[in-house]
Image (spheres, rainbow, N blue to C red):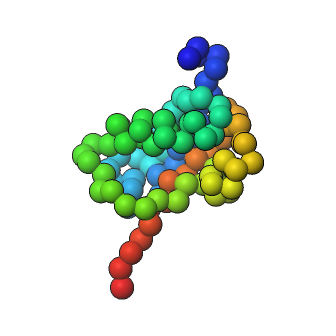
């Protein structure tokens, strides 16, 4: 993939997830097609963790909209879109 075929996306790490990183915001470069970009973005983010992040559910939002909805619509990422990773919280 050429650099011109990539977009820079801001990633916001919500809740306890940010404690595994140096801050709660990252910038990643990826392919514009959201369906292809999501696994790449998650991999890039997890590769930057200071220690292994526990596995579990996560909601992914793109500019405040559920990523799943946007994937179904064929969304194409734009430079400076904001992707928020929200870990699922369980407990009682």
- Left/right placement of residue 33 relative to residue 84 reads right
Report x, y in % for residue 5: 64, 20
Report x, y in % for residue 11: 53, 44
Q: Which residue appears farthest toward the bottom when viewing the image?
A: 92
Q: Which residue appears farthest toward the left when viewing the image?
A: 51
- Left/right placement of residue 17 relative to residue 31 reads left
Up/down of 9 relative to 15, above or below: above
Q: Which residue appears farthest toward the front when viewing the image?
A: 72
- Is 60 or 9 nearer to us in this picture? 60
Report x, y in % for residue 25: 48, 44
Residue 22 in sight in this render: no
Image quarter (top left, top right, bottom left or bottom right) of the N terminus = top right
- Is 24 or 7 nearer to us in this picture? 7
Q: At 50% across and 53% down in the image, what residue appears? A: 85
Residue 53 in sight in this render: yes
Report x, y in % for residue 36: 57, 36
Q: At 54% across and 29% down in the image, what residue appears? A: 29
> In the rendered image, which quarter is residue 82 located in?
top right
Q: At 41% across and 38% down in the image, what residue appears? A: 43
Figure label count: 0
Q: At 68% across and 55% down in the image, what residue appears? A: 69
Image quarter (top left, top right, bottom left or bottom right) of the C terminus = bottom left
């Amino acid at each position: 993939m050429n650099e011109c075929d990539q977009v820079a996306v801001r990633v916001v790490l919500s809740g306890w997830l940010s404690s595994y990183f140096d801050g709660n915001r990252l910038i990643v470069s990826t392919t514009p097609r959201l369906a292809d970009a999501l696994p790449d973005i998650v991999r890039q983010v997890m590769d930057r963790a200071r220690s292994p992040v526990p596995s579990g559910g996560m909601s992914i939002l793109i500019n405040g909209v559920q990523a799943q909805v946007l994937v179904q619509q064929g969304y194409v990422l734009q430079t400076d879109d904001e992707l928020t990773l929200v870990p699922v919280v369980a407990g009682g």
